[in-house]
Image (cartoon, rainbow, N blue to C red):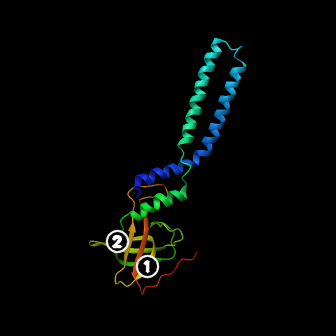
Amino acid sequence: MPNIEDVIKVQEEVSALSNAPLAIIAGAIWIFITVAFIVFLFKEKKVLSLKGWIYSFFFLVILFAVTGYLSYTIKEYNFSMNEKKWEKNYLNPYIESLPERKENIEDFSQVLNNDNKNTTKSIYIKKDIQPIVVEISLSKNIDQKKMRIQAIVQKEQIDQAYITYKTIEKDISDKYTKDQYYETVLHIPSDYKVIVPSK
């Protein structure tokens, strides 16, 4: 099972692939310049002075250094990985392995006109899930805390509603952060009605 460090590392490799085309083009250009300069040296070897050879040697060292660096950079790209493979092989197994948290709810209501402000977003492994926005009241000792959250609703034979969710310990990327919930489910008594969001 991948840990969060593995998930972050491979995600960074996937993100870095967006720079790969530029690195490949730059590498091809520098290889062309290097080859062209070597050809120039062979053609002009009888004409060049000692000073010209010294300058040419240093310029050649720079060309080889840049070309070598670009070749190493291109070699380091993980072309076998992409966003979908990363999600399937790293992110999803990691989220599935996370412990589920449970909070009892004193009250809840569905929010129909939501502007997404102050709403805790939820992410699901299955992409076709359409969560709704609910405002829930959590009992924290004497105080009652209200919050808006995206959740899918599951009706059950229970008396009191509760919510289950998962959280991650570190930000993985801009999309997958510790400020949102994962696999959030609002468990409600079976006699409640909920409006299903339209696609």
Residue in the picture at 45% in, 52% down: 8
Q: Quadrant of residue 191?
A: bottom left
Q: Quadrant of residue 29?
A: top right
Q: Position of residue 169 (x, y in %)?
A: 38, 57
Q: Position of residue 85 (x, y in %)?
A: 53, 58
Between residue 56 and residue 102, name the one nearer to us: 56
Q: Which residue is mark 2?
A: 102
Indicate the quadrant containing the N terminus: top left, top right, bottom left or bottom right. bottom left
The local crowd at label 2, few if under 14, some if 14 to 19, many if 20 or more residues have their Cα within 10 Å, is some
User: Considering only vertical position in the picture, is 173 above or below 157?
Assistant: above
Q: Amino acid at mark 2?
A: Lys
Q: Position of residue 188 (x, y in %)?
A: 40, 80
Q: Which residue is mark 1?
A: 154
Which label's residue is closer to the chain start, 2 or 1? 2
Indicate the quadrant containing the C terminus: top left, top right, bottom left or bottom right. bottom right
Q: Quadrant of residue 23?
A: top right
The answer to whether any part of residue 177 appears in the image is yes
Q: Amino acid at mark 1?
A: Gln
Residue in the picture at 42% in, 63% down: 95
Secondary element at tag 2 = strand
The answer to whether any part of residue 175 appears in the image is no
